[in-house]
Amino acid sequence: MNQDNKEPKLGIIVAGSLNKGIEVKLDGSASVEDVAVGRYVAIEGRRHRFLGMLTDVSLGVTDPHLTLTPPDTNDPFITEVLSGTSAYGTLHITPYLIIGGGASIIEGPQPVKTVPSHFSPVYLASDNDIELVFGKEDKDRFWIGNPLDMETKLCLNLPELVKRSNGIFGKSGTGKTFLTRMLLIGILQKSQAVNLIFDMHNEYGWEGTSEGSKRKVKALKQLFQSKVAVFTLDEENSRHRRVSTDFTVKIGFDEITAEDISILRVTLNLTDLAVEAAYQLQRRLGRSWLRQTLELSDEDIEDKLEGLNIHTSSLQSLKRGLNTISRLPFMQPHVDTPAVNELISYLDRGINVVLEFGRYKDITAYILVANLLTRRIYDRYRDLTEKAMAENTQPPIPLVITIEEAHKFLNPEIASQTIFGTIAREMRKYNVTLLVIDQRPSGIDSEVMSQIGTKITCLLDNERDIDSVLSGVFGKGELKSVLAKLATKQQALIFGHAVPMPVAFQPREYGSAESYRSFTDDAGSAEQAAKDIEELW
Amino acid sequence: MSTEAPQRAGEIIATSTTDFTAQCYELYQLPPLGSPVKNGDAELEIYAIVYNATTSSIEPGRHPIARGKDETSEEAIYHSNPQLEKLLRSEFSALVVGHKAGDKVHHYLPPKPARIHSFVHLCSPQEIRDFSQSLGFLDIIINSQLPIPRDELIAACLRQISRAYEDADSFLVLVGKRLAALLSDNFSQLSAILERIKQ
Ligand SMILES: Nc1ncnc2c1ncn2[C@@H]1O[C@H](COP(=O)(O)OP(=O)(O)OP(=O)(O)O)[C@@H](O)[C@H]1O
Ligand SMILES: [Mg+2]
């Protein structure tokens, strides 16, 4: 148990409970101003070493007179004597792990089942502690950033991460996109999974922008040319942005099903009856139902809709909606090779695909396309996985699908109907998981939220969003104060399945030449990286 | 332990478990208020803190009378009345705060009190430093019943002790913190003492 504590001692434990956390009285030499919530601390108990997170800081006095007649603070002697004695700081610590002593010596860090004894000294956690818990950068572990106020690399086990669906949250401008881009690189390099990214704002494929410096930052394809393909829905726009694309996606009318319409109910402003009508029409008219419905003239209606219980107003409502869809420039009456086939052929080869939306940032297009393609891909993954199980063959490469504005797909109203709801709920039964990005997590169905394995959240300030992200998490109240105090940019809190305990961290810097080098360096295949870089400069 | 001969401060004329009174050999040769003194031998050395001093007539019934009407200075009075040195005496009282038995310093009362006619010596700086390694003696002073204000005594004692330290400031901060813990529920007493020991 006698680890060298090179880090400064903060104080000693004076009270606490496992559920409510531990109170630490600060030593006179340590100032409350030197510590910040979210920091990791190590507690040297009598038999175990504990690791916890600093979740609150407060000030106390031993005698209330002190607050009524404060001492002469200009006198350094008086101030020095009183601080830490009569007037002291208290730290509130949520204990998470036992990292030394007992079973943890053999089995590694263990969840806490007790608290350290009275008067155990408390230190800032050392680099060693962090490394012990989160591991070193290696073939599975990807460096995502540094714990707040620490130099240590915080690493994430990516094969473990992609076993579940994950979420990245935070209000606008807090760094979700930067964080996601970095995580996608990690997944690409170390998870043994392949990415499909529905890139609403064209920032993951070729390049994105950094709002601070207004400069461009490289995205996946620039860094990992041979491992990434860029698909586009808007060829002209991509060309305009000088992105070399691998495939232009067109969607045929006959690829659209009533299900696709049903999840667009809100965005297309359809009535329930209009959605119901779509199902009926599809049943009656078959694959070409959309085209036929659009072409229905008033005379045909009687014939074609005979026996169907569709009200004219519902039909009108539906037709308006279908018209909106059919006017989307990437829609065509018929497409010979459906985009999904091309997509799958890339994914099968382990090539990551970014689908750019170009100018079609309209949410209707995004939901429609993401949902439609994902459903096809999912069907195929399901078939392949089932086949693999039955015939004992190789299952498909695990797939991670990234979607933005996730609450549009996963709100309580439609989460049970969309393919994304299904994927989120069933974990990775068929080797498909999600990476959802959202700035309004409270809009996501709570059941889906509870299935999200690992959550990374930047600053959130809406109470409901905070609640929804933290619901069901141990130490929720305490994490809330950590979350609410994150910086407005480039700080995040990660917790859940892939991390042994929550960590507030500063994501790796992204955008400098050096950062690109560090990303491409640990690609493993150093040669390929070098080649990629050579081609770039 | 210091090798120079310890300076004798007086001879004990009254004694009890908790304190003793000693008479000085020379009139007014009193150890300062709060100074650490010792009594006894290597077997049992008693440590005490000077908390009171008096100078009065040798005979209880006889009060000193004013004699300086025609003199120009105080010294002149003593010069013209050499018998005064014999008629007056200086005494000091010290509160027992610990003892040393063999090599070990204890910050609690000794098993037996000092003896009448035994000598009282000033403690050497080394002895003071050894004794004040632990600040347990503060407890005894805080909890004693004395004719003088305790805050005054504690402050005087700490000022005296701090002189044995090269870095008196750090020592005072250290004891200040210890006092703050002992007086955690009495901030006014604490600040009264701190005001008296700050440099
Ligand atoms: N890891 C990082 N490295 C460098 N800069 C960063 C990083 N994270 C955030 N930033 C800076 O913060 C800005 C906002 O980040 P980002 O675009 O990722 O926010 P966002 O949460 O995706 O916002 P929105 O909700 O509007 O899409 C970036 O343009 C960049 O300047
Ligand atoms: Mg963004």
Image: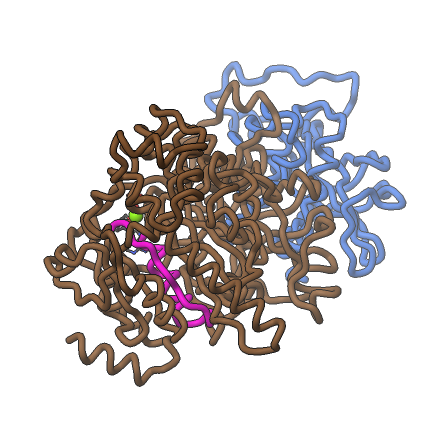
Chain colours: A brown, B blue
Going 64% across and 31% down the picture, which residue do you hit? B184
State the residue at coordinates (46%, 62%): A154
Horizontal and vertical percent position of residue A455: 49, 50
Picture coordinates of residue A290 (x, y %)? 32, 44
Q: Is residue A462 above or below residue A93?
A: above
Location of residue A447 with respect to A140 vertically, above or below: above
Q: Residue furthest right?
A: B112
Does residue B146 appear to the left or right of A318 in the view shown?
Answer: right
**In which image quadrant can residue B22 be found?**
top right
Name which residue lies at 66% across and 45% down: A13
Q: Percent position (x, y) of residue B104?
A: 78, 57
Q: State which region is magenta.
A: A177-201
User: In front: A9, or A393?
Assistant: A393
Magenta highlight on residue A183: yes
What is the quadrant of the N terminus of chain A in the image?
Answer: bottom right
Do we see residue A382 in this rendering? Answer: yes
In this rendering, position of residue A405 left or right of residue B65: left
Q: In this view, does B172 lie to the left or right of B22?
A: left
Find out whether residue A187 is within the magenta segment. yes
Whether residue B25 is visible: no
Up-down relation of residue A422 to residue A158 (above or below): above
Depth order, front residue of A154/B4 = A154
Give residue B115's quadrant in the image: top right
Quadrant where the image shows the C terminus of chain A: bottom left
Residue B173 in the image, given as x and y percentages of width and height: 53, 43
Residue A426 or A257: which is nearer the viewer? A257
For this orientation, the residue located farthest to the bottom is A527
